[in-house]
Amino acid sequence: MKLEIAVVDLPGALIAAEEGANRVELCADLEVGGLTPSTALLESCRGPLAGTTEIHPIIRCRPGNFVYSGEELGTMAEQIASCAARGADGVVFGALTPDGWIDRAGTRALLDAARWANPAMEITFHRAIDECRDPLEAIDLLAGLGFTRVLTSGAEDSVGAGLDLLARLVQRAAGRLQVMAGGGLVVEDIPALKAAGLDAVHLSARRKPAPVPAGAAAASPGVRTSTGTMPMVLTPSQETATDRELVKEARAASR
């Protein structure tokens, strides 16, 4: 099975690569489901991961639903071009209509932006498919448009609950595109996913950092200065970290 790890920083990307992940989905703000990462983050990951682990940034310009205005689609098309110019191996996006179908015009516009920027770039439709009225019909449309894969939990809060639909999506795809299981995935789900015919899994493998004991601020993450270490204030995205052991377990289970 292919293993993809969602990461928000260079240390997480390095852990994923060192433990054998095939891809990283590069994100900002995983707390809201992931937003387009900064170009600085993409550039910092490109060199260390080159030749070993693919980088697929998510393209999502704001939190909330997946119904986008023309202006927002234009912004995301620009983000796709920017990521391609900086060596992204693929991009991840999705767009829906207000009534719960795939936004064909918007999706084609983003596809065109990706193909124009790099015809060889892989393209993943993200978990917006889980909010579609008919995910099975969506598979046919996405395969026809030329998507490489789709990321889905089987239209449930977790892949464990969505296992039956995931198996049906694999059958419906019939090799035309890859169905990758992700969303509330735990390592213990992987054997059942294999048995259902899935050949790719996605997880964030995150943990909360251990709390810093009282009076130990100098030992917390910080910036070294001439007068000592200045503790940093963690941003929301930095309050979780990629857990090496979880990535290692996922890699072992998915081989």
Image: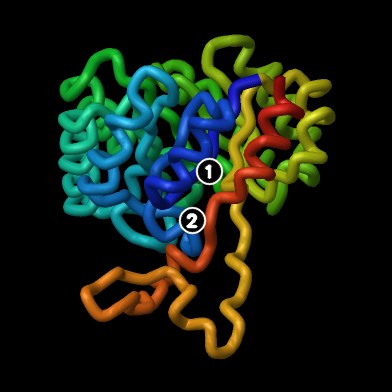
Give the image location of residue 4, x and y in percent. Answer: 54, 33
Give the image location of residue 8, x and y in percent. Answer: 42, 51
Q: Measured along the vertical axis of the image, is residue 85 above or below residue 44?
A: above
Distance between the Cα atoms at labels 2 and 1?
Answer: 9 Å
Q: Amino acid at mark 1?
A: Arg
Residue 33 circle label = 2
**Residue at the outermost bottom position:** 215
Q: Is residue 168 left or right of residue 176?
A: right
Residue 142 circle label = none
Among the two numbered marks 2 and 1 on one chain, the one whose residue lies closer to the N terminus: 2
The total number of labels drawn is 2
Quarter of the image where the N terminus is located: top right
Mark 1 lies on residue: 127
Q: Residue at x 17, y 53 (%)?
A: 71
Give the image location of residue 108, x and y in percent. Answer: 29, 29
Give the image location of residue 2, x and y in percent. Answer: 60, 22
